[in-house]
Amino acid sequence: MKKLLLFFTFLFFFLPIMAQIEKPPTYRGCENEDIENLEACFNKSLTSDILEDFKVPEIVFKENYKGKMTVVFVVNKNGGFEILHINAVYNELKDEVRRVFETLPTIQPATYNGRGVDTRYIIPITIPLVQEEMVEEIIPQNTEIPVVQDDIQDVIAINNTLFPEFESELNIPFTHRSYDNIVYNISKAENTHSAFKPYIYNEVKPYVDLNAQRMELMFDKSSWGGRKLLNEHLVKIQGDNFWFTLDLLWDLQLGKDNSDIDYTYNNTRALQIQGGLNEKFSFFTSFYESQGRFADYINRYAISHKPNENSFGLVPGRGRAKEFHDNGFDYPVAEGYISYTPNEIFNFQFGHGKNFIGDGYRSLFLSDVSSPSTYLKISTNFWKIKYTNLWMWAKDNRLGFNDGNTMQKYIAIHHLSWNVTKKFNLGFFEAVITDNSDKDGFNIEFFNPIIFYRAIEFSNGSRAGNALIGLDMKYQLTDNLFLYDQILIDEMTVGEVFSGDGYHGNKFGFQIGLKYFNAFKVENLMLQAEFNRMRPYTNSHNTVSLNYGHFNQPLSHLWGANFWEGIFITRYNKNRWFGSAKFIVGKKGFDFDNSDISYGGNIYRSYDDRPSDYGNEIGQGNTTNIFITDLQGGWVINPSTNLQVFAGFTYRSFDQLQQTNIDPTKNTTWFTLGIRSELFNWYLDF
């Protein structure tokens, strides 16, 4: 045991030091310097060459500009200079920086184990202000104003492997907030696909320089504590053909709603490990140990959806919970996957986690509102096509169902994304849900990667599976404005669609939305409007285990079915600051307490329990008007783990036709604040 402890101590504390470069780049004229002086000579010589050749653009004279621009660049393993990002007020300044860097000499690169390696750098350049009256009268417009030597800070060397995940086959953690910039950049690029999430780092690398954006947020911290708290991963180990990071994550919240609860809280401690072997294989795992008590309506939902008598509740989006102290929940969660990309066409993933299909805030095809599930995913990219196969091992564990034991169910999904033109994308979706009633596991027919599930369902009989089909589209109206939609068909009788008689078998839903990036020319301001509508009994089945759900939660829209919903979202970020506002208004039909009749809102009830074959309309049953406001704001402490301090306010109006025990009619106000690593979406807007 002592030897093992010594071994892990060596791994965590000594290998990170050994994994750094052993010799910095050698600039022209520095060849005879001792190794300890190479960095200083590099800084001085590079700065001198930049200043000697730099010509301040004419617009700087005219507008009397004084300020600083930041250049992020790399000295590659061949000794060449490559610019990654320029943060400057004027495009003319950016152009001049590029011109100057093109004139820089090829030098001796940094080395590790005698081999050339890439190294990244940041250099800030300050330009002095010229008095307005002097510009026109004394200094001709073609006269050079020198960049002041003393105003240029020391060049800050950044090891290119500080964030190795950016060059990996790992998934980018999916949150709507963090994906705004990524979605915007890939959506306006030619022949890209934005619907199936999460994205892979190497998949978006040609369109978004995440490393350069991260560098812009870096604080100049030399101490180990400062770097680990504000900039970097807690532990990073890297060699020639592997890398490994370890982080401790937190979600510590305290709040108060307007119920009788003394206070709300969440206490999450988590461990996250990620890494890669060579360039094609990556892995990820995380474990969350959590205790929490939430606003009253969430607590009621959690208790009413408990999987069995041995559990206290089901925390929405997370999983099974046991009781903790005074009406709190103890809910551990584990996620992990492996990702392998053998070539530029295929990616294979197997793991336990979540996926999402769509360009909206909600998804009618596959959302990430339920608990993590085991999945196998194959992504195929070629020509103008991205074709994704997803197989999921889901669970049906309703209270009182199947003698309290969890029933295994299986879901197979195909999604084909086709870039019809540069601005128009068309997607095709199909899914089938089967159970384990025959005790033969996942039906081998549904492992066929190219097949129409509806035909298989028909040939096997309706009780052998439940098939869904869908169509999604996205159109780029302008450089910053995108229109998207989804149409989901669970079941449809063509002769009844336009009859207006409310036939129960017309089970479908649709979504339409609009995203406006850099709205009104304000950088990083995103506006979104979305409308969702789902008819009664959609995603349900007369064989209840064949509903489109997992772990007592929907796999599609959070509200299940029998609703309409309008959403408006605005999000803004600047440097490490962020803020968002979300407004939701809608109407949903619930069932009445202790009633044997299903009005089509609960997908975990059989549609055979309907009150009538006809006359079924959205909002029928216990009609409820819902209005939700959610405001969030905060500051990112460490972008490597998206650790942030935040404050939030939620207002929820829930006005029912007839009050129920599970969620009585009332208004909720809820204030929260805390510190958290935001690495997944948590939907509490129901």
Image (cartoon, rainbow, N blue to C red):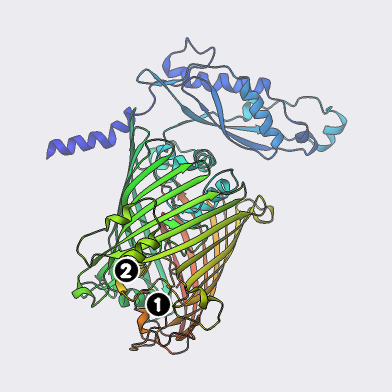
Q: Nearer the viewer, residue 480 or 72?
A: 480
- Name the residue: 73% across, 38% down: 65
Q: Residue furthest left?
A: 1
Q: Residue furthest right?
A: 137
Work out whether 473 lies above or below 58: below
Q: The residue tagged with tag 2: helix, strand or loop?
A: loop
Please tell me the numbered disc located at residue 461: 2
Q: The residue tagged with tag 1: helix, strand or loop?
A: helix
Q: Nearer the viewer, mark 1 or mark 2?
A: 2
Callout 2 environment at 10 Å: few (<14), some (14 to 19), or many (20+)? Answer: few
List x then y, in percent, for residue 146.
71, 25
Calculate the distance from the C-alpha at mark 1 to the C-alpha at mark 2.
Answer: 40 Å
Amino acid type, residue under disc 1 in the picture: Tyr
List x then y, in percent, for residue 392.
32, 57
List x then y, in percent, for residue 91.
69, 37
- What is the quadrant of the N terminus in the image? top left
In the displayed structure image, the side of residue 140 where residue 418 appears, left or right: left
Dot 1 corresponds to which residue?
297
Q: Nearer the viewer, residue 96 or 566?
A: 566
Work out whether 441 lies above or below 129: below
Amino acid type, residue under disc 2 in the picture: Gly
Judge whether residue 627 can be spotted in this image: no
List x then y, in percent, for residue 278.
34, 32
